[in-house]
Amino acid sequence: MVNIYTARLVTERIQPNAIEELFGDARPRYRSAGTEPGLGVIMDSAAHVITNHHVIATADLIRAQLADGRIANAKIVGRDPDTDLRCCSLI
């Protein structure tokens, strides 16, 4: 079993609150969103990991953390949205 962590780089504009508007400090501010956790299973010695499609469907970055604490980047090598499965390869 491995822990899957994904990041999706989305820039969102944050609306100013009433105090910022009142004191004229309503400059545009932005933030980046998201890390989504999930689980996967290492399937073979080539380090292919099976996980759910919805866990990494919109990910820009995928990382897998092994039980011993090591972390590896991963790339998508196969997908089947109909069965909600994806295959990643650790790199």
Image (tube, helix red, strand yellow):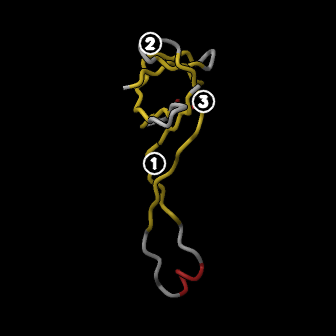
Identify the mark at residue 10; answer none if there is no mark. 1
Q: Nearer the viewer, mark 2 or mark 1?
A: 2
Q: Residues within 10 Å of mark 2 (few under 14, many from 20)?
A: few
Q: Is residue 17 above or below residue 11?
A: below
Query: Image check: 45 left or right of 85?
Result: left
The residue carrying pointer 1 sits among few (fewer than 14), some (14 to 19) or many (20 or more) residues within 10 Å by Cα, namely few
How far separated are the C-alphas under marks 2 and 3?
A: 18 Å
Asked if the residue under mark 1 is in contact with the one under mark 3, i.e. CB atoms within 8 Å, the reply is no
Residue indicated by mark 2: 45
In the picture, which quadrant includes the N terminus? top right
Tally of marks: 3
Secondary structure, mark 1, is: strand
The type of residue carrying mark 1 is: Val
Residue 29: quarter of image: bottom left
What's the amino acid at mark 3? Leu
Q: Vertical placement of 73 versus 48: above or below?
A: below
Q: Could you say which disc has been placed on residue 39 in the image?
A: 3
Nearest the viewer among 90 and 86 is 90
**Picture coordinates of residue 67 (x, y %)?**
55, 31
Furthest-bottom residue in this view: 23
Of residues 56 and 81, the one drawn nearer to the viewer in this rendering: 56
Question: Tag 1 or tag 2, which sits nearer the N-term?
Answer: 1
